[in-house]
Image (tube, rainbow, N blue to C red):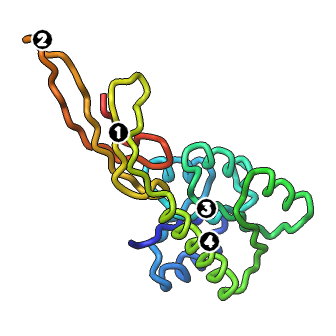
């Protein structure tokens, strides 16, 4: 399965360089120049890892960490910054960053960090396969996971409803889910 990476930086040269390097290594790469654009893209697409600039035009990278942690908690988030102060490192740690890389960064170092985080993510997702039904909010659906929980997981949803003859009808729906949130509407 191809790994997807979102690179967020307002400097065009950094964005282009990192994107080209990662694409050459076989990753699917998407880019964003602002925190708002990154949030929109992460709500529409699923990424394994995000490289986040500490200082973006519309928000700090740590604010973006918090926002993305709520919508994509299992996506790896690494801060990328040219400002390596103790305060910035502490702020990134408080925001639950999975890593902290100082720019300019050596290519081999960047690739090693990315590969190591993705390897750990794969190991964790293989251990988190679940086959237990999950009750959908409102008790209208029973969701049956059929894949690793930390990746896009497809669910078979079963809705039980009474028909006009007093019998139960079973309606099966299929929905995509990631990290506890349904990505498609089932109502």
Compute the Cα span from label 2 to label 1.
Answer: 24 Å
Dot 4, crowdedness within 10 Å: few (<14), some or many (≥20)?
A: some
Question: Residue at (70%, 84%) from the top-left corner?
Answer: 109
Q: Quadrant of residue 49?
A: bottom right
In the image, is residue 36 above or below residue 137? below
The numbered disc on residue 117 is 4
**Element type where label 4 sits in the image:** helix
Dot 1, crowdedness within 10 Å: few (<14), some or many (≥20)?
A: many
The numbered disc on residue 76 is 3
Circles 1 and 4 in contact, beta carbons < 8 Å: no
Dot 2, crowdedness within 10 Å: few (<14), some or many (≥20)?
A: few
N-terminal label among 2 and 3: 3
Q: Nearer the viewer, mark 1 or mark 4?
A: 1
Compute the Cα span from label 3 to label 1.
Answer: 26 Å
N-terminal label among 1 and 4: 4
Question: Residue at (66%, 88%) from the top-left corner?
Answer: 108
> Residue 10, position in %: x, y?
65, 62
Compute the Cα span from label 2 to label 3.
Answer: 49 Å
Compute the Cα span from label 2 to label 4.
Answer: 54 Å
N-terminal label among 3 and 1: 3
In the image, is residue 187 above or below residue 8? above
Question: Residue at (86%, 57%) from the top-left corner?
Answer: 90
The numbered disc on residue 166 is 2
Quadrant the C terminus occupies: top left
Compute the Cα span from label 1 to label 4.
Answer: 29 Å
């Amino acid at each position: 399965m191809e790994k997807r990476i979102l690179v967020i930086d307002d400097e065009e040269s950094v964005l282009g360089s990192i994107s080209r390097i990662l694409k050459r290594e076989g990753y699917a790469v998407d880019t964003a120049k602002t925190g708002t654009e990154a949030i929109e893209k992460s709500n529409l697409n699923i990424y394994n890892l995000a490289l986040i600039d500490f200082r973006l035009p519309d928000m700090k990278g740590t604010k973006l960490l918090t926002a993305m942690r709520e919508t994509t908690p299992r996506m790896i988030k690494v801060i990328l910054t040219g400002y390596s102060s103790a305060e910035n490192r502490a702020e990134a740690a408080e925001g639950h960053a999975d890593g902290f890389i100082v720019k300019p960064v050596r290519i081999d170092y960047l690739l090693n960090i990315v590969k190591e985080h993705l390897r750990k993510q794969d190991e964790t997702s293989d251990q988190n396969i679940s086959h237990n039904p999950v009750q959908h909010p409102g008790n209208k659906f029973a969701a049956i996971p059929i894949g690793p929980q930390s990746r896009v997981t497809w669910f078979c949803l079963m809705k039980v409803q009474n028909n006009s003859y007093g019998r139960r009808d079973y309606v099966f729906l299929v929905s995509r889910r990631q990290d506890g949130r349904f990505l498609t509407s089932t109502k």
